Amino acid sequence: MLTNLEQFLPNNEPQSLQSYPFFWISQVNGKYTQLIEKSIKKLGIDNTRRKIILSTNALGQASITEIANLSTLKLTTATKAVYRLVEDDIVEVFSSEHDERISMVKLTEKGRSLVEQINQISHVTLAGILNAFEEQELHHLNAQLKKLFELMPIS
């Protein structure tokens, strides 16, 4: 079934890792995270908080579960980080109008300002890297990564 694709799976050969797409996804994500963490340090936030701030901004207002899913964080991690962001007046938490058991989150004015700062820092940090690609290459890369994501089973 996989015979022609086995070259893309890790095996006992050390160099096989270099042909494994998930190896490269992991490597890129690791480098990206290090770059971003170093860049946002001056804002007084870590990568977990950055993810929550940007996810909340993208969703408008959302439940902590929705934010955790978009941020690719465990629910307990997201919940703790959200309440730290509340203490810093970056987000506010309130009960859902439809179900008071659900905690909803939205950005404060300070949070919206932070989104702009994070985006400026990301632009400066990543522009040189992205400029190494043609626009069509980036569209293709995004399409391939999206396809890979959609093929992954929900855990």
Image (tube, rainbow, N blue to C red):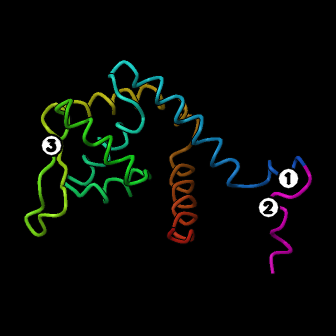
Do the numbered discs 1 and 3 sit on residues whose CB atoms are within 8 Å?
no
Query: Residue 47 location in percent, x, y?
Result: 42, 35
Residue 74 lies left or right of residue 114; in this view the side is: right
Q: Residues within 10 Å of mark 3 (few under 14, many from 20)?
A: some
Question: Dot 2 lies on which element?
Answer: loop
Quick check: is 8 in the magenta stretch?
A: yes
Instruction: Please report the residue visible at 27 percent of the width from the left and 43 percent of the height from the top.
Output: 82
Q: Total number of numbered labels? A: 3
Q: In which quadrant of the rendered view does residue 102 lie?
A: bottom left
Task: Residue type at mark 1: give it.
Answer: Ser
Task: Residue type at mark 3: give it.
Answer: Glu
Do the numbered discs 3 and 2 sit on residues whose CB atoms are within 8 Å?
no
Look at the image and give the residue range highlighted in magenta: 1-13
Mark number for residue 92? 3
Residue 142 lies left or right of residue 114; in this view the side is: right
Do the numbered discs 2 and 1 sit on residues whose CB atoms are within 8 Å?
yes
Q: Which residue position is annotated with label 2?
A: 9
Which of marks 1 and 2 precedes in the sequence? 2
Question: Dot 3 lies on which element?
Answer: strand
Q: Residues within 10 Å of mark 2 (few under 14, many from 20)?
A: some
